[in-house]
Image (cartoon, grey):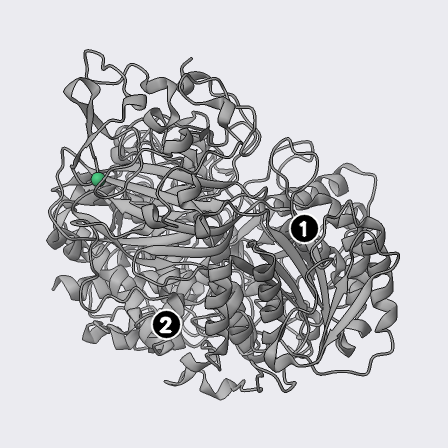
Amino acid sequence: MNVNQSAPPLPPFGQSQPVYPGYHPSSYGGQPGSTAPPTPYGAYNGPVPGYQQTPPPGVSRAPPSSEAPPASTAQAPSGQAAYGQFGQGDVQNGPSSTVQMQRFPGSQPFGSVPLAPVVSQPTVLQPYGPPPTSAQVTAQLAGMQISGAVAPALPPVGLGYGPPTSLASASGSFPNSGLYGSYPQGQAPPLSQAQGHLGAQPPQRSAPPQASSFTSPASGGPRMPSMTGPLLSGQGFGGPSLSQPNHVSSPPPQALPPGTQMTGPPGPPPPMHSSQQPGYQLQQNGSFGPARAPQPNYGSSYPGAPTFGSQPGPPQPLPPKRLDPDAIPSPIQVIEDDRNNRGSEPFVTGVRGQVPPLVTTNFLVKDQGNASPRYIRCTSYNIPCTSDMAKQAQVPLAAVIKPLARLPPEEASPYVVDHGESGPLRCNRCKAYMCPFMQFVEGGRRFQCCFCSCINDVPPQYFQHLDHTGKRVDAYDRPELSLGSYEFLATVDYCKNNKFPSPPAFIFMIDVSYNAIRSGLVRLLCEELKSLLDFLPREGGAEESAIRVGFVTYNKVLHFYNVKSSLAQPQMMVVSDVADMFVPLLDGFLVNVSESRAVITSLLDQIPEMFADTRETETVFAPVIQAGMEALKAAECAGKLFLFHTSLPIAEAPGKLKNRDDRKLINTDKEKTLFQPQTGAYQTLAKECVAQGCCVDLFLFPNQYVDVATLSVVPQLTGGSVYKYACFQVENDQERFLSDLRRDVQKVVGFDAVMRVRTSTGIRAVDFFGAFYMSNTTDVELAGLDGDKTVTVEFKHDDRLNEESGALLQCALLYTSCAGQRRLRIHNLALNCCTQLADLYRNCETDTLINYMAKFAYRGVLNSPVKTVRDTLITQCAQILACYRKNCASPSSAGQLILPECMKLLPVYLNCVLKSDVLQPGAEVTTDDRAYVRQLVTSMDVAETNVFFYPRLLPLTKSPIESATEPPAVRASEERLSNGDIYLLENGLNLFLWVGASVQQGVVQSLFSVSSFSQITSGLSVLPVLDNPLSKKVRSLIDSLRAQRSRYMKLIVVKQEDKLEMLFKHFLVEDKSLSGGASYVDFLCHMHKEIRQLLS
Ligand SMILES: [Zn+2]
């Protein structure tokens, strides 16, 4: 049997293993004997002579919360400082008007010849001639509404936007509450003419990435502009910082015939060019242009094929030009192209250094020797051979690892390999685990370690002959010799205290103070738990979960419950000495659900009644965690605490907190204190929890500031999760809370875990980001790790790499399964190494880069002023792009912005990170919101950061109702909204349904069961269940979006020009934000300026 060809899907950690000779299936699941040396973890963590590296001076590898300030290395060149002002709207920012952006050499007058010059590799953003005035650009932007080939109905002019008052309550439960408080006067939305925008194909990511080499459409060649001309000076749509003396793709001066200027945003549609350009269709991606011809890659098809309006012939008369947002790289286009190019074929992992499809592409993975991108994604799949090269490029070398990622049903879970008493085979020196890259020599009697080159003996029981190519003849029968990911059953050597672990336990710890009772939370939760306990995680095939459960309630004191099956009624034991927490009972506290069901049900019935009349408003917090941890310790097991907590713990007890929220600290050097815990007590407590394998999940229900930055320390350091439901009310929030709770309780978790990333000689892991604890520089300790959590690891050179041998990563996760089995999960990944920078830039993955950069920045705010963090990001991005420009791009004029194909979205995505609530909060974003988002992002995988920073915006009525597929997204900008349409916007945490003011009455009726737009309830969170195709389609789409995300997204219906719309607009990330965040166009101009400064 060849596992590569016919690996059948198995249940997670499946019991039924395929028959592999030599696997010892008989002993699988059993407890191997314990004849091995009794060194707990010794084999795993022990010193590794000659291999274990020490961090270089200055590289801190302490836990993230105590990390040295990574972002404080303010290496920003002098030009950097200007950016903050740029973002704040200083007209002096952005490229100055004296910086001439020049025409691409050899390119034709804009729009006149439909041929794009092709240069090697780069995406070229072609600027044109002297820029128009800032007002012109502003107006052009304003006119960039995109909604149809003819101008659709526009929002009524002059309706304006209501005062941004009292929005907070409507958005109370949103982590990213909006920016409504400071909505500037006079900032009318860009309501000007919707244009049939006759653009070129937006830039594409072609497949394979290595093959992409073209001049971006933005270089101007074939692009046909559509606006008749810029607005008159001074008629921009407001916003102080829209000055853009220089910008990409601005029209050449000769293309601005006088007399074609528009009269202003509310004016009539400009003359269209439809007569000159027949055949333009609305594209599926929401942009306009010719119907998409097959474009296998730009290299071949670009120069001649897309002729934009089917007029390859003589140059057309020059229409007036406008700044064209479609001329700058579009995330939507890149995502769609990758789906089209790479979504149909499985991604086979047999080849070293392959860049996987984007996270937004649906694809299947076939493991042929490297870990699936679902487990590991890298910023680059081709690493510079030398550290000098790496320093020059400034491209972070990082891997985003999700060791327990859930797989789609079509893909097999990792096979479990049982080597019996001898345990997994490892290199004697570096302790790397047997993997497909180990080289067997001397007829199979020895193997050379692929990580440290040590020659090891093959144990007799593992011996096998080699074939004529030097490969073991059983290679394809053994997962550890043929697959990128697999598991080993661990022997007792890998167990704490040299004892196999007991099954884990879950302890539910419920705040029963006044707020919790009054909001209905306690009653709701107790009712839910009665049924939820039947769905505790199980091993594949097991009839019932091995996990035991316990219950605690608390306010200023703690109440433990004896729910032993032999009792007729539960018994309560009160511990009021919270300063010296102990567990008052052992027997009967942690029980099997089915055995104690009657007593548990009785308890859950009684809890809401017992505290119904409570007047206790104060709570403790640290003693609750302490109690849960002590209970697990007493039971000698790992486990998870589920804390349901409502308020700032001000009661006299360890970990007592005070309200130290102070928004005045924002934009000061002390802003970082808002992200830091206010006491060290929680770090100490977290450390004890980690030692016990006690993971803490925290559900917060605050009505006001609760100091999330401090309360989330223990969940963060124990691999747990934090959920936050501000101003919780049962009727509004129960669906979201219960959905999150169900998912959280049911998800498979590895307990008491240690993760180690080994690398081949030349690079090593130097920095780690995520929810975990580190007591040394190499081992990532996770009290718990679930299938949603990622650890981002950064690598640095410590020697020269070799192009021939490449670079190897091996991530080993030792953990206790839900059933109490000790296992090792191994992921291997081989990367290429290069001596040419171009190879690095051709094999990068921007989504992963952004994941790393966001985590780096979000950790940086703990120690550095936020402005420093932002400047550091901008500098790094500019250095990356400048290095490309200098070393890889074809010679061209300095006026061109040239982006590497794989990184052409880096500016737009980085700008989204820079303007996120953590780095640039709006007036209404609370300190708790920022702390919450900060710790959430720390554990996000690449797909999550991608949609979190650049939300998905889906038009609902553009595609046929009967279409089963998701509608194609449009760019996250107000210009893309048609007031005759309805859109869904989601970012993984929030979900909006935006309704245009001119949407057809039939659509309104079908979706909302009301007769007109004005009757739609703003802020609605549930759509009526109506029996018509549109209603069904939209509701099923909402269900499908929710199913794709790890947290339930509560729906908010937003009506155009309603007050709530400000909240929604916060997520239109290509636009300038109310908190001062730059628009995409502005930021790209700024980035161009930065790059030019670096190059000059
Ligand atoms: Zn080795």
Would you call the spot at circle 1 few (<14 residues within 10 Å), some (14-19), or many (20 or more)?
A: some
Does mark 1's beta carbon lie closer than 8 Å to ligand 1?
no
Q: Which residue is drawn at 43% across and 55% down?
A: 228
Q: What residue type is labelled 1?
A: Arg
Say what secondary structure mark 2 lies in. helix
Q: Residue furthest front?
A: 35
Q: Position of 179 compared to 60: left or right?
A: right
Q: Which amino acid does label 2 sit on?
A: Ser
Q: Position of 74 compared to 942: left or right?
A: left
Q: Which residue is drawn at 53% across and 25% down?
A: 9
Tell me the quadrant of ligand 1: top left
Q: Mark 1 points at which residue?
A: 548
Q: Nearer the viewer, residue 1081 or 312?
A: 1081
- Based on the displayed image, in which of its 4 quarters is residue 648 positioned? bottom right
Q: Name the spot of residue 173 as percent of width and height, x first.
A: 66, 67
Q: Quadrant of the N terminus?
A: top left
Q: Quadrant of the C terminus?
A: bottom left
